Amino acid sequence: MSDFDGTLCPTSLVNHSLFQKSIPTIPPQIEVSLLKISQLIPVFIVSSKDFDLLHVTTKRFASTISCVLGIETINHIKHEDETVLDCITERRFSADTQTLTENSKILSHLLEQEKIQSYIHECDIRIDRKFTSCNKILIGITFDYRHLDNWEKFKKVDEPRLLEIIRRTINEHTQLGGASYEMEPYIQTYTSHPFLDLYAVKCDKGLAFDSLFKRNSNDPTLSDSITNTKNVLYLGDSENDNPAFRRSDISIGVSSDKRLNPKLACKYNIEFEHLSIFLNRLLENGLIFSENLLKF
């Protein structure tokens, strides 16, 4: 299992055109390794990105694609052909369509707010909208400022102001609509990553993990600290990977940018430049993990 952006491709390797969706790219040597692994065992992708973006770059090796922090999960037939249209074998959501649709209106309303629009243009923030693969319901928004020369300053000074506007707008809208606490949109923040995320419903990669392995996430005995899922190796790079790190048997944090210093709940750490070497060593070792594979 692996995160996508920042893990299989560095945080900085994206298309920053204001008129196109940012599309991170996986380096060829890593993609080749993942393709070989996928011919032996299932490869799952768990990401905050939506299916349309993830499918472009993971279609050759991903058996399951958990999109937008598990709000939508796709069982997928791996393929090479760009024209394949029936590669989705199952699609499921973490919330009912009515809830997603209603909260999608809140997300759309927020982006239309004059204060938000002003902030986006004045601070040069990129907006990444995430949609369901069917019906194209807006279920997530990322405020992305990784392209700024000094994103550390923005994180400390400007992001808290933007966060306050978002919270105030959500509160006003949900109070008028009488929405319950469980139905409110969910905000994801990071200690050092240059993003601020907003989702239609509560979601995280732990819930996505439980869904992928058909675990009962409503079981009160389950917690963030469960570590009894054997033979699952998880790769990630940020705090939103921590719930999945805690649930996996082998957890490896990937570092691709020296400016980032996230607090990761992983057992091991690796530099991005060594990731393809590690994956090849894993293949050569018959997919049997050993700490020696992480020595460079």
Image (cartoon, rainbow, N blue to C red):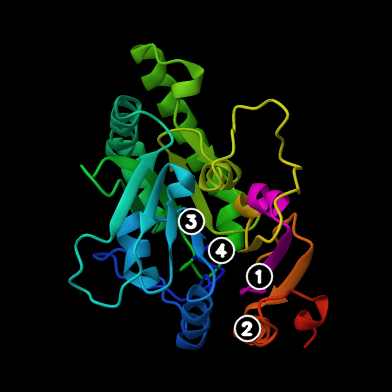
- Magenta stretch containing residue 247, yes or no? yes
Span colored in magenta: 242-258
Numbered disc in front, either 4 or 2:
2
Query: Would you identify the image quadrant in which residue 15 lies?
Result: bottom left
Identity, as a three-letter code, of the amino acid under mark 1: Val
- Position of the C terminus by quadrant: bottom right
Numbered disc in front, either 1 or 4:
4
Name the residue rendered at 58%, 54% in the picture: 155
Left or right: where 225 falls relative to 105: right
Sequence-first tag of 3 and 2? 3
Left or right: where 51 falls relative to 258: left
Rounded to the nearest whole Å, what is the CA distance between mark 1 and mark 2?
A: 19 Å
Dot 3: within a 10 Å radius of its alpha carbon, few (fewer than 14), some, or many (20 or more) residues? many
Residue 215 in percent (x, y) is at 59, 39
Numbered disc in front, either 3 or 2:
2
Q: Are marks 4 and 2 in contact (CB under 8 Å)?
A: no
Sequence-first tag of 1 and 4? 4
Label 2 sits on residue: 283
Rounded to the nearest whole Å, what is the CA distance between mark 3 and mark 4?
A: 8 Å
Label 1 sits on residue: 254
Q: Are marks 1 and 2 in contact (CB under 8 Å)?
A: no
Rounded to the nearest whole Å, what is the CA distance between mark 1 and mark 4?
A: 10 Å
Quick check: 279 above or below 226?
A: below
